[in-house]
Amino acid sequence: MRFLVQVRATADSEAGVVPSEELLTEMSKYNEELAKAGVMLAGEGLLPSSKGARVHFSGRDTTVVDGPFAETKELIAGYWVFEVKSLEEAVEWVRRVPNPDGSLGVIEIRQVAEADDFGEEFTPELREQEERLRQRLAENR
Amino acid sequence: MAATETHRAIDAVWRIESAKIIAALTRIVRDLGLAEELAQDALVAALEQWPDTGVPDNPGAWLMAVAKRRAVDVIRRARLLERKQEELGADPPRPREEPEPDDVGDDLLRLMFTACHPALSTEARVALTLRLLGGLTTAEIARAFLVPESTVAQRIVRAKRTLARDKVPFEVPSGDELAPRLASVLEVVYLIFNEGYSATAGEDWMRPALCADALRLGRILCGLAPKEPEVHGLVALMELQASRARARTDRSGTPILLMDQNRGRWDRLLIQRGLAALRRAEELGGLGGPYTVQAAIAACHARAVTPEQTDWVRIAALYELLAALTPSPVVELNRAVALSMAFGAGAGLDLVDELAAEPSLANYHLLPSVRGDLLARLGRDEEARTEFERAAGLTRNARERAVLLGRAASCAAHHAVEPRGEQAEDDSG
């Protein structure tokens, strides 16, 4: 099972405060441990939302709003992609994320969906449509 | 936390920690079977205590401490026995307690080499590796390989007995011994992967959980032996093959051949990882090992956004290289297909005709199937029909037989046959 592990932003991460050396050292040790256990497929830290943007949809119209965004605790400051056997295993790994300076707030674990997870709602036609879309995306690469 | 929740957390901790604990204990007590028992004792202690106390902050260290304490007890008791034997004038068993650095990685690597020791049968190596390093239960292994649980349990017991009887040392082999022993480890991991990727038994054509287990073992091995090019080559091969997993069957479970797959469904993350692993393998050892070369072939497909963009010239050259490293008529047949895709059906047919005399391919349905395909592409319909019919008579797969008979019929009707060259170069490349 694949999980997206999202590290939620904090006031510090949003302010672009550089993490302490201690945190960086422990985090790189942790990442190494994840990689050595064959668990981590990907992982990246994100810049503050002030470097990002949002696209709002309203009917056919879109509006672009540049960052920063206010609701800090809902923002994402980094992520991992884990491949593990169960949600519990993902939880067990996340419990081990180092937090030497107490700066971490919330880490949210979400399972990555496979087509089969959409069940009956995902009709053959929809599925085909999605497959066509993926095909086009691949061709445009 | 409710008791069932704690039990599920313990399961998860066990999956993460068990291999490290068993490996460290084996180094201490020098007996794999005993080490696993001691580790199980620690697990039982956790099952008894954690529902009341909660999961400790560092569950791995907790389990390791309990297990090591029991190991020390065992050693102490053995020493006591030894002293008594000495007093009785018996031959003392050799004391074994050379102090060694407490390196988890080294222990894990030793455990992997021990579990894949050539003294064991292939089935035993697979079962022991999944159990000790993959953290799977006997029941899970039995389910994955569709055999009774008692069979797996027996294999494991016998394997441990063999290791003890042969006094297999708990070590990473060195010198001339390393290469063949590493090959044995890689073979076991790839076997597990293939059992998942093209299930040899049962209803499902794929058992993705086994592929995931093998990939995890391979990725762990990359961390333990980062300088071995073929370790990265194998992982590259597995990542690239796994990237196609969800495109390999249609909704009803019918296999889809490589060239017909919807490439948009290929897993880009795994492709990226596979290509990165291949780069590392090539940096370390060039195209010097069979796994790396096979990964390079798989990478040709992964890089081709459409089937038409496939670099068949390179694939043909890589198959030639593979044939030189691991000569095999099946590799030659794949090379013939690649040649036909690169340079036309005639180029492939010459090689296939050479293979026709190969006794090991006499009952291999893909040989007449490929030959039929090439003949059909050359417009030699009548000969093609005979080959397809022969192939249909040889295959044991009902769906494949139907396809082959259909092609035979269309040759007989002198229908224009769509060029298809991927029969042998199916999804293994």
Image (tube, grey):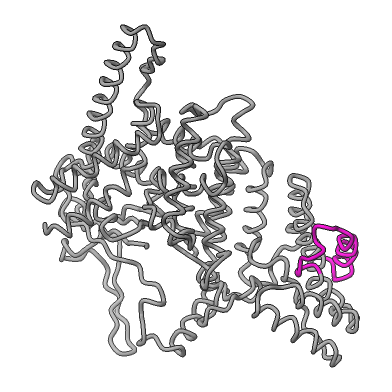
Residue appearing at x 23%, y 46% in the figure:
A96
Most foreground residue, B232 or B366: B366
Measured from the top left, where is residue B89 in percent x and y? 37, 6
- Tell me if residue B91 comes above or below residue B212 in the rendering: above
Compared across the picture, whether B40 is left or right of A136 comes to left
Compared across the picture, whether B277 is left or right of A60 comes to right
Most foreground residue, B205 or A77: B205
- Tell me if residue B323 comes above or below residue B313 in the rendering: above
Compared across the picture, whether B316 is left or right of B193 comes to right
Residue appearing at x 49%, y 26% in the figure:
B169
Q: Main secondary structure of the magenta part?
A: helix
Q: Quadrant of residue B336?
A: bottom right
Most foreground residue, A123 or B129: B129
Q: Is residue B227 magenta?
A: no
Q: Quadrant of residue B357?
A: bottom right
Q: Which residues are magenta?
A: B343-367
Which image quadrant: the C terminus of chain B? bottom right
Measured from the top left, where is residue A22 in percent x and y? 23, 35
Measured from the top left, where is residue B93 in percent x and y? 40, 16
Residue A18 visible from this viewpoint: no
Q: Quadrant of residue B250?
A: bottom right
In the picture as drawn, the residue positioned furthest to the left comes out as B52
